[in-house]
Image (cartoon, rainbow, N blue to C red):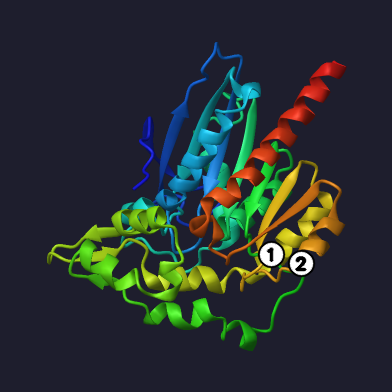
Amino acid sequence: MVHLEAAYKTVIPVSPATEGYNTERLAVERYEFPAPKPAQTKTAFLWTHSNGFHKETLHPLMHRFIRQLRQLSQYDHTDIHFVSFDARNHGDSALLNEGKHIPYFSWFDQSFDTRQVIKEMRLKEDYDTLIGVGHSFGATSMINLEFFYPKTFDGLCMLEPVIRDEVLDVEIRNEFPPIKFTDKRRDTWDSREACFKALAPRPFWRDLHPEVLENYVKFALYDTPDGKVKLKCPKEEERDVYKVGFVPSINAFASLRAVSIPVRFVLAHGSVFTDPTIGGLLREQSPRVSVDMVDGTHMVPGEKPDDIVPSIVALTNDVNTEKNRKAAKL
């Protein structure tokens, strides 16, 4: 199992611009990787997870990325910090907010919560560079945040965001497999071992990298008073998040026309969330947009984390090259 040890953990309020502002909270962690040589700059990476998962399922990818970045001499004088958080109805945040369900939590709320993390963790004030890395629901929410507040990020690496150039009819949306079947999924087991044995042979779960599946089983569950284990993210909440994602998805697509920072998309050939043919449309929206295609499904960050690292490194290099070019003109 690959689990990053947090240098700092905290609990913060959700965005004051959203419903639940006075009751709900977010679990946030920071992971620190000091420069191997005297530090001259600080870069923060903010990581956001997909719907139904949690921050720890990104740890195998984060581990591989920092290992690769530390092999590049241009970052020898850069302190690197990772910050991640659980969406308010996921992971550790879901436990903090148990019994405080609001009837409407949108992907736009997630955008504002992401901004709240940036503010509370001082990711603009205390760092020279801020880069966002998001998957699925987390990625789409980051794109919309950048649209609402330009230059929030210096660059974005978006892993299989849910992004479309149209809004599907309600009858079609209601047949969307994650919406249709989430209510039917199992959410309670006798133990974590029983959960692992139940999930590991099944098609969706067996495609995940073993380290990701191990982290899911270890950190997605909590111990119940009756001696069982249950998903921290209630399946009803997961379903509702899917149901309200369609308008934010087209908003994210349209917002790319105004993007002013480097945005690199990583799309999977086998995705059922994002039509691979949309890659060309994404490029057409802005010269700031680039697209990488990889083998895998919508869950490719959790299936093949090694294949995702080059794209995040490339985005990081693009951001730093641009910053150095601007500094040279001063």
Crowding at dot 2, Cα within 10 Å, few <14 / some 14-19 / many 20+, comes out as some
Crowding at dot 1, Cα within 10 Å, few <14 / some 14-19 / many 20+, comes out as many
Q: Is 215 displayed left or right of 113 in the figure?
A: left
Q: Is 86 displayed left or right of 221 in the figure?
A: right
Residue identified by numbered label 1: 163
Residue 152 visible from this viewpoint:
no
Considering depth in this image, is 119 or 323 the residue closer to the camera? 323
Looking at the image, which residue is at 44% across and 46% down?
59
Quadrant of the rendering where the C terminus is positioned: top right
- CA–CA distance in space, label 2 to label 1: 9 Å
Q: Are marks 2 and 1 in contact (CB under 8 Å)?
A: yes
Considering depth in this image, is 88 or 312 the residue closer to the camera? 312
Residue identified by numbered label 2: 278
Percent position (x, y) of residue 9? 36, 36
Q: Nearer the viewer, mark 2 or mark 1?
A: 2
Percent position (x, y) of residue 109? 56, 56
262 versus 181 height, above or below: above
Residue 128 visible from this viewpoint:
yes
Check the image and name the residue furthest to the top: 38
First of labels 2, 1 by sequence position = 1
Q: Is 144 displayed left or right of 22 in the figure?
A: right
Percent position (x, y) of residue 210? 39, 57
Amino acid beneath label 1: Ile
Percent position (x, y) of residue 285? 84, 57
Q: Is 202 displayed left or right of 127 in the figure?
A: left
Amino acid beneath label 2: Ile
Looking at the image, which residue is at 69% across and 64% down?
163
